[in-house]
Amino acid sequence: MYINDHDVLALDAAAAALGLPAVPFRRFRSAALLYWATPGGSEFRGSRREFWQRVALPYGRWDCAGGRAVLFNKFYEPIWVRWPTGEVRRADPTEWVRWRAQSWFYGRCVAVPLPPWRSGRTEQLCLAILADFGVGWCAVPAVGGAR
């Protein structure tokens, strides 16, 4: 995958807007493949685009006692929480969520098998889930390059 300087700046701006301190801590030969650390402490090796899709797009949802709903990313880190009052806030990525029900939006066990970094349709589904959840803006900028 090729990522140009404009894409890097757009992703860095998204990181700053999200308050995510994800900084590559080791660089490979290819500028597009880096080691990343998520806000919750997980590590990932890959391109910036795939990292942001894994960290910022929802992979599933936890329903908790009391009516709280939490969206989690591919690293199973909470990313957004909706309280019973309807208030939506960024979740603490280090919180251990005690859920009662868990569901997934894509993967082998559901109707949408391909992840967002392999399917534009899945990416659009995840963005629609964020909008339906009450997140009023897109956490992942549109980036050029091969899919």
Image: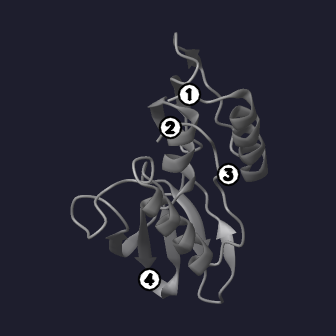
Q: Can you give x and y, in whole percent of width and height, for residue 57 in the image?
A: 53, 57
* Amino acid tagged 1: Tyr
Q: Earlier in the sequence, mark 2 or mark 4?
A: 4
Q: Please rate how many residues cluster around mark 2, counting C-alpha atoms within 10 Å: few if below 14, some from 14 to 19, many from 20.
A: few
Q: Earlier in the sequence, mark 3 or mark 2?
A: 3
Q: Earlier in the sequence, mark 1 or mark 2?
A: 1
Q: Distance from label 1 to label 3 (Cα)?
A: 16 Å
* Amino acid tagged 2: Ala
Q: Please rate how many residues cluster around mark 1, counting C-alpha atoms within 10 Å: few if below 14, some from 14 to 19, many from 20.
A: few
Determine which residue is flagged by label 2. Answer: 146
Q: Quadrant of residue 63?
A: bottom left
* Amino acid tagged 3: Pro
Q: Can you give x and y, in whole percent of width and height, for residue 76 in the image?
A: 42, 54
Instruction: State the SS at label 3.
Output: loop
Determine which residue is flagged by label 3. Answer: 141
Instruction: State the SS at label 1.
Output: loop
Determine which residue is flagged by label 1. Answer: 2
Q: Distance from label 1 to label 4 (Cα)?
A: 44 Å
Q: Residue at x 52, y 80 (%)?
A: 68
Colouring method of the image:
one colour
Q: Distance from label 2 to label 4 (Cα)?
A: 42 Å
Q: Distance from label 1 to label 2 (Cα)?
A: 7 Å
Q: Earlier in the sequence, mark 1 or mark 4?
A: 1
Q: Residue at x 47, y 30 (%)?
A: 46
Q: Can you give x and y, in whole percent of width and height, for residue 112 in the image?
A: 31, 66
Q: Are marks 1 and 2 in contact (CB under 8 Å)?
A: yes
Q: Please rate how many residues cluster around mark 3, counting C-alpha atoms within 10 Å: few if below 14, some from 14 to 19, many from 20.
A: some
Determine which residue is flagged by label 4. Answer: 65
Instruction: State the SS at label 4.
Output: helix
Q: Are marks 3 and 2 in contact (CB under 8 Å)?
A: no
* Amino acid tagged 4: Ala
